Image: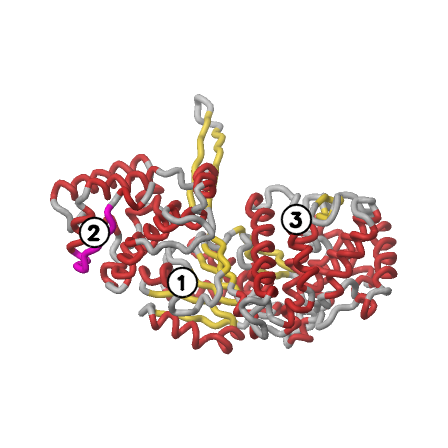
């Protein structure tokens, strides 16, 4: 498939051009090809990757529902698809005539929001109109995903077997979805089309925005959407750990109802991890399946909570007890939001990057060692450095490597149907003591990672040098290796028991095995061994800077309400 198969539109008369286009046989054939494409197959993605056209995969998948798309969105996707196919990865992308045509459509609001099928069955001549009407009728019977999708991002299937008397029925169900994960600098620059392309065809953007993000960047959000003549409906939420309860989710659901959010209208969530978790859960619950776009403004969100399919809220004094599996359709990480972050937030977020490096990506680990304090000092290459400074490229490599590793680990086990999850490194015992200790999430995870690495070395799975290399990296970034909470026997015992209960009686703790960048699973640790090894680990940590304690380790240290002293709202 390539753009040469169809002459690109050139006329300045949009309606005349659209009519001519809709009545051409080559356009009809293109639509059939798009609709019949195996959008949810591994082979389609592999073919695009082999052609160095990865940037066109999501467009091709969405265009399977082309007839149901607004004209603006349809031509934006078509332009993106052809640009990817007609260019070579790593080179400047040639601007497709279809993209230019899409821009013209986008500036004509009534056209931009008119569905393609509606246009084809009302404006074209009688014979063409009848062909598309018949096509829609056939698809309604044979392939409803292509003509009446609830969401172009999802597809279901199934089969049923039953006994001859129909008293016993066995059903098999399948579910497929896809997501786009992007690192974009200056996502709110009016020349950056990523958000415009999603929301212009809809005419509005419903946005849940973190209270702090609103104070720092609210004007930039308004300027961006105003410049593209998109109505912005912002709803501002305080998003501290103490707010991560069901009442916050209920407020969001009320806002969705009041605004009349539809099931094919992506909500924009702009903020950090707490808003990503609660907002994503609200989207999962509303209409049972409301899509959302995640614009991450913190490191934890950008490389972990933002693209994560695990949406959740806290409950009964335990982290993330209630939730749903509901990934964003698009996840955007913009490192320039990091410019305004407190240093404590940077350290806390880097913990999640270290997590993926230790159990998944040795190259990423090496990059983190090379960057050290410069990553914090320059806010990931966004301040106090020249464009050609090596920390700029290093920062981009670190974010890209962390995201790729996280997505590889997470998306192959979307519903946590098994517990072999490398991205849960550091998260075995920490959920049980994080709130009680009032720790920032990243510091609690760092303690869990350090202890897990210690258990790995004790089992002979990594060398002592590799253990200390891991501990030195975390300590060098000011992260916690230990905390007094580890001496609280009832809390640690309850944490151990809770995780066994949550994981169906298995510990299955991911820890490095076979070297840094590799993962194994520890499934046996008695309560007696837990306390014995915790004591030995704390003794080891005492020789590290600050006695193994972290810098700005607690929520109160970065201006957040202490979750251990507040009721979950």
Task: Tell me: 399 left or right of 517.
Answer: left
In this rendering, the answer to whether 69 lies above or below 313 is: above
Q: Residue placed at 68% from the left, 46% from the top?
A: 503
**In magenta stretch: residue 406:** no
| Chief secondary structure of the magenta portion | loop
State the residue position of label 2: 119
Residue 107 or residue 291, whichever sits in front: 107
Structural distance between the alpha carbons of marks 3 and 2: 49 Å
Of the two numbered discs 1 and 2 on the same chain, state the one appearing first in sequence.
2
Of the two numbered discs 1 and 3 on the same chain, state the one appearing first in sequence.
1
Query: In the rendering, at what x and y percent does residue 141 appear?
Result: 29, 36
Task: Tell me: 448 left or right of 343.
Answer: right
State the residue position of label 1: 195
Q: Which mark is residue 360?
A: 3
Q: Secondary structure at mark 3?
A: helix
Query: In the rendering, at what x and y percent does residue 280 appear?
Result: 50, 58
**In magenta stretch: residue 8:** yes
Residue 492 or residue 105, whichever sits in front: 105
Q: Which residues are magenta?
A: 7-15
Please report contact status of discs 3 and 2: CB closer than 8 Å, yes or no.
no
Number of other residues with Cα within 10 Å of mark 1, as a class: few under 14, some 14 to 19, many 20 or more = many
Of the two numbered discs 3 and 2 on the same chain, state the one appearing first in sequence.
2
Structural distance between the alpha carbons of marks 1 and 3: 31 Å
Query: In the rendering, at what x and y percent does residue 257 appear?
Result: 40, 63
Q: Residue furthest left?
A: 126
Q: Secondary structure at mark 1?
A: helix
Residue 505 visible, this angle: yes
């Amino acid at each position: 498939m390539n753009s040469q198969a169809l002459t690109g539109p050139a006329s300045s008369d949009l309606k005349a051009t659209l009519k001519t286009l809709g009545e051409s046989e080559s356009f009809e054939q293109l639509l059939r090809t798009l609709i019949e494409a195996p959008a949810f197959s591994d082979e389609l993605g592999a073919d695009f990757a082999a052609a160095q056209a990865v940037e066109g995969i999501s467009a091709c998948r969405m265009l399977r529902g082309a007839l149901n798309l607004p004209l603006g969105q349809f031509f934006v996707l078509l332009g993106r698809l052809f640009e990817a196919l007609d260019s070579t990865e790593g080179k400047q992308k040639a601007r497709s005539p279809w993209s230019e045509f899409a821009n013209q459509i986008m500036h004509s609001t009534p056209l931009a929001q008119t569905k393609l099928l509606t246009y084809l069955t009302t404006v074209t001549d009688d014979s063409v109109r009848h062909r598309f009407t018949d096509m829609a009728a056939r698809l309604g019977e044979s392939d409803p995903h292509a003509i009446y999708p609830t969401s172009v991002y999802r597809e279901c299937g199934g089969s049923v077997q039953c006994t001859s008397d129909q008293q016993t029925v066995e059903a098999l169900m399948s579910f497929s979805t896809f997501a786009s994960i992007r690192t974009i600098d200056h996502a709110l620059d009016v020349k950056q089309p990523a958000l415009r392309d999603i929301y212009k065809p809809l005419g509005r953007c419903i946005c849940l925005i973190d209270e702090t993000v609103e104070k720092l960047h609210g004007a930039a959000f308004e300027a961006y959407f105003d410049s593209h003549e998109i109505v912005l409906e912002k709803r501002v939420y305080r998003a501290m750990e103490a707010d991560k309860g069901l009442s916050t989710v209920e407020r969001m659901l009320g806002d969705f109802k009041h605004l009349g959010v539809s099931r094919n209208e992506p909500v924009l969530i702009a903020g950090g991890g707490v808003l990503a978790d609660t907002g994503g859960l609200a989207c999962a619950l509303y209409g049972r399946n409301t899509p959302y776009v995640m614009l991450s403004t913190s490191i934890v969100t950008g490389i972990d909570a933002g693209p994560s399919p695990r949406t959740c809220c806290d409950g009964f004094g335990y982290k993330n007890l209630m939730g749903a599996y509901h990934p964003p359709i698009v996840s955007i990480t913009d490192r320039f939001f990091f410019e305004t972050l407190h240093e404590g937030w940077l350290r806390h977020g880097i913990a999640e990057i270290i997590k993926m490096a230790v159990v998944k990506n040795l190259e990423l680990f090496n990059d983190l060692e090379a960057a050290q304090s410069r990553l914090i000092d320059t806010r990931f290459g966004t301040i106090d450095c020249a464009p050609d400074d090596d920390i700029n490229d290093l920062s981009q490599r670190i974010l890209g490597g962390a995201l790729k590793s996280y997505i590889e680990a997470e998306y192959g086990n979307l519903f946590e149907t098994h517990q072999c999850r490398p991205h849960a490194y550091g998260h075995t015992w920490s959920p049980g003591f994080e709130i009680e200790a009032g720790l920032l999430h990243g510091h609690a995870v760092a303690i869990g990672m350090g202890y897990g690495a210690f258990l790995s070395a004790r089992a002979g799975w990594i060398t002592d040098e590799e253990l200390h290399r891991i501990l030195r990296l975390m300590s060098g970034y000011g992260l916690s290796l230990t905390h007094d909470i580890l001496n609280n026997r009832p809390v640690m015992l309850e944490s151990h028991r809770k995780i066994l209960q949550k994981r169906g009686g298995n510990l299955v703790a991911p820890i490095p095995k076979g070297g840094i960048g590799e993962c194994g699973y520890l499934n046996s640790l008695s309560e007696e061994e837990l306390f014995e090894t915790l004591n030995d680990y704390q003794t080891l940590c005492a020789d590290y800077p600050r006695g193994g304690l972290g810098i700005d380790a607690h929520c109160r240290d970065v201006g957040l309400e202490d979750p251990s002293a507040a009721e979950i709202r």
